[in-house]
Amino acid sequence: MSVENKSTVRAVERALDILLCFTMKNEWAMTEIAEKVGLHKSTVHRMLATLEERGFVQRDAASDRYRMGLRIWELSANMWGADDPAVISLPEMEQLRDQLGETISLYIRDGNERIRIQALQSNQAVRRVALIGARLPLYVGASSKILIAFEEQSKREELLADNTWPASIDKIQFQEQLEEIGELGYATSIEEREQGAAAVSAPIFNRAGRLIAALSVSGPANRLTLDKMREQAPAIMEAARHIGTMLK
Amino acid sequence: MSVENKSTVRAVERALDILLCFTMKNEWAMTEIAEKVGLHKSTVHRMLATLEERGFVQRDAASDRYRMGLRIWELSANMWGADDPAVISLPEMEQLRDQLGETISLYIRDGNERIRIQALQSNQAVRRVALIGARLPLYVGASSKILIAFEEQSKREELLADNTWPASIDKIQFQEQLEEIGELGYATSIEEREQGAAAVSAPIFNRAGRLIAALSVSGPANRLTLDKMREQAPAIMEAARHIGTMLK
DNA sequence: TAACTCGGTTTCATTCAATGAAACTGAGAG
DNA sequence: CTCTCAGTTTCATTGAATGAAACCGAGTTA
């Protein structure tokens, strides 16, 4: 798209691309990877040997196929320290799920996307792992709007400008929506991202007042009507506020 | 120690070493890293630019310091699929904690080490994040013994041979211990790894009968006497078995 | 049993990409 | 205003990364 002016290291870029394969599928044969990333197999072989040596990938002895190594998990475990919002917020999320009986999710922004870092399926005691880690667009959905609306002024403008917005979204109208959300303190969405789904979302600020995440309640649109969501909003905002007080 | 005959990619090795810095401390200035890994700062600069481009690190705009990027978290989230033992076992662990009132941990083996992938502190509703992700030696502690004793024959022998065992451990005696553990189905340890601490541990097998993890209960040695641990062992084994049935 | 096929591995000459020295920038500190 | 220090950019040098090709070994076919 644009000129890459930052000087980078090609070999490392390639290695990282290989690692990123594992977001799509968590077991790869060497040649599969070579094909996917478009590199010669001897190159991939060397790369994988390097990654394996450092524990970033591991190979199944029997099938010769590669999976992610525990070093990656280890890194991620050290990522947040004692302040992992996905963990801190869990009890509060459980309570909210029990109270409202709907799916509860937690999103943070990463560039022009948002990532679901925690999720509790209605009634189910176990979080729906499959969906944790999902990357979603930042231009649709209640949580997206929260993550933009409550971002600090400069960042917000940057996002609105920089983003490659889908033509279908009217910027002026979107801005107005953000204004309104800023006043209300919560956002709703009805079938914005997914057919038949609706969601309410509220911002989580840490004690320093910085936007950290968006807490959202989602469910089928026929059950989560606008009225229903407005009714639930205060509980969600309260939960979000409560979580925030635990984040430094 | 020995000759590195595997051919690897130097640039990638260096980049991974930079990433691994973040297991020690999660905020680094560029020069700190350069010093730590022993590379020229312009090299580190280029590496970090590459890592940042792919989202593996991110820099705090204000302080110019680097942290891990969300890509790492994203990778780790996809690591286990729907079968993350750390998640699957959570409800069972909670129950065990409530029942026994002690700290519950979950370990898996990684080479010659074990990693704590889940932990619940007695009474506290929130897991003690700080300790999740900890790497511990594989030659002391109840869980270590479990992770060796119930490993399949060939792997077990390999571990016993290959390992750089501390001279203080008598191999013959250790072997006998493993035998006994194999028969009992659980292992105990008293002040093996940590002064004043004791632990009981039981193996978790998946439905295919493969050893996946070790579930352990730990506490102060004066409270967790050998008798007490023997008394608790059945409950732990039962919990471990129950978790195992949920792992494919 | 030989001839193929198809993953993975190793070798090696070529060359281009990674490197580090050095110069530069800009923000604080003295 | 100078000094220092962290980060950035430039650029010539060269050795490290590369990919073609050969190799290996297991499984499949004829």
Image (spheres, coloured by chain):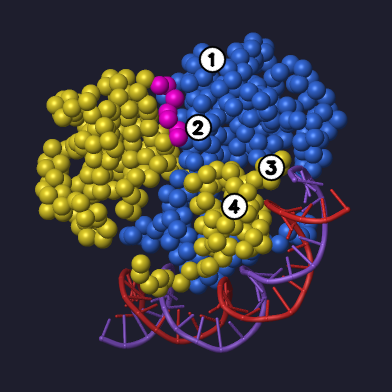
Chain colours: A blue, B yellow, C purple, D red
Q: Are marks 3 and 2 on the same chain?
A: no
Examine the residues drawn in magenta and state their main secondary structure. Answer: loop
Residue A100, disc: 1
Q: CA distance from mark 4 to mark 1?
A: 48 Å
Q: CA distance from mark 4 to mark 3?
A: 14 Å
Of the two numbered discs 2 and 4 in the rendering, the one whose residue sits closer to the viewer: 4
Which residue does the numbered mark 4 point to in the structure image?
A: B32
CB under 8 Å between callouts 4 and 1? no
Which residue does the numbered mark 2 point to in the structure image?
A: A82
Question: In the depicted view, which residue is nearer to us: A6 or B14?
Answer: B14
Residue at 56% x, 65% y is: B11
Of the two numbered discs 3 and 2 in the rendering, the one whose residue sits closer to the viewer: 3
Dot 4: few (<14), some (14–19), or many (≥20) neighbours within 10 Å?
A: some
Residue B165 position within the rendered picture, expressed as x and y whole percent measured from the top left: 24, 55
Which residue does the numbered mark 3 point to in the structure image?
A: B63
Chain under disc 3:
B
Of the two numbered discs 4 and 1 in the rendering, the one whose residue sits closer to the viewer: 4
Q: Are marks 1 and 3 on the same chain?
A: no
Q: Is residue B226 above or below residue B168?
A: above
Q: Is residue A41 magenta?
A: no
Chain under disc 1:
A
CB under 8 Å between callouts 4 and 3? no
Q: CA distance from mark 1 to mark 3?
A: 41 Å
Dot 2: few (<14), some (14–19), or many (≥20) neighbours within 10 Å?
A: some
From the image, which quarter does the C terminus of chain A lie in? top right
What's the amino acid at mark 2?
Ala
Q: CA distance from mark 3 to mark 2?
A: 21 Å
